[in-house]
Image (cartoon, grey):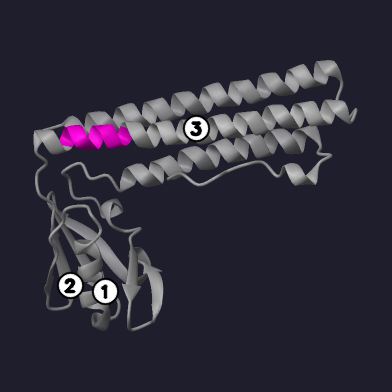
Amino acid sequence: MIPPLELSTTRFPMDPEEAIFEVEEAMTKCTEYLVHEFSGVRTGKASPALIENLDVHVHAYGAISKLKSIAVISSPEPRMLVVQPFDPSTTRDIERAIRECKLGLNPAAADRSIRVPIPELSEERRKDMVKMIKQLAEEAKVRLRAARKDGMDAAKKMKAENIITEDGQKVFEKEVQDFTNKFAKKIDDLATAKEADLMKV
């Protein structure tokens, strides 16, 4: 689920430039998070992004760590990832985390590294993942609409407190809508590109 990205409405009155900056920042973060989510949806090709952001519980350190912070991930072959832990004692924890991450992967520890074969996707699995892509994109648009509402509320608040004029409110609201249209298109483009990538055989 994409996390909330509301504006800091508790800090009113706000400067119009600051407010519109927060609107754009919220929408930017929304699309950036979507890109992050899409990177974890495998396409049948070996890409380090597929697993690099996994939360791995490493007993040796007694903490939750990002995989990319405790190992080097490479793709020496089109359908193979190789994970090389900085500390060999974490190998089994990393192997288990990859196996349990619901990506359908079957890692195998060997010496001081872990080999992760990337199986081909069946047509049915590809279609399921396309549905997932559409759902993630829709969640991103929900957050986008929330950021838009916050922006419009900010305009009304600033107008009520005479920080901006009525014309200034209209200009501000148009900027908010322009940003909304821009980022909605970006979300659609990201989803379309990811779907096309998924459906490649």
Disc 1 + disc 2, Cβ < 8 Å: yes
Earlier residue among tags 1 and 2 = 1
The quadrant holding residue 53 is bottom left
The residue that appears at 15% across and 31% down in the rendered structure is 200
Pointer 3 local density, CA inside 10 Å: few below 14, some 14–19, many at least 20: some
The quadrant holding residue 84 is bottom left
- 192 w.r.t. 83: above or below: above
Residue assigned mark 2: 113
- 174 w.r.t. 30: above or below: above
- Check residue 85 in the rendering and tell me which mark sits there, or answer none: 1
What is the quadrant of the N terminus in the image? top left
**127 relative position to 166: left or right:** left
The residue that appears at 24% across and 81% down in the rendered structure is 88
- Check residue 124 in the rendering and tell me which mark sits there, or answer none: none
Query: Which percent across, then down, holds residue 195?
Result: 26, 30
Magenta highlight range: 126-133
**Disc nearest the viewer among 3 and 2:** 3
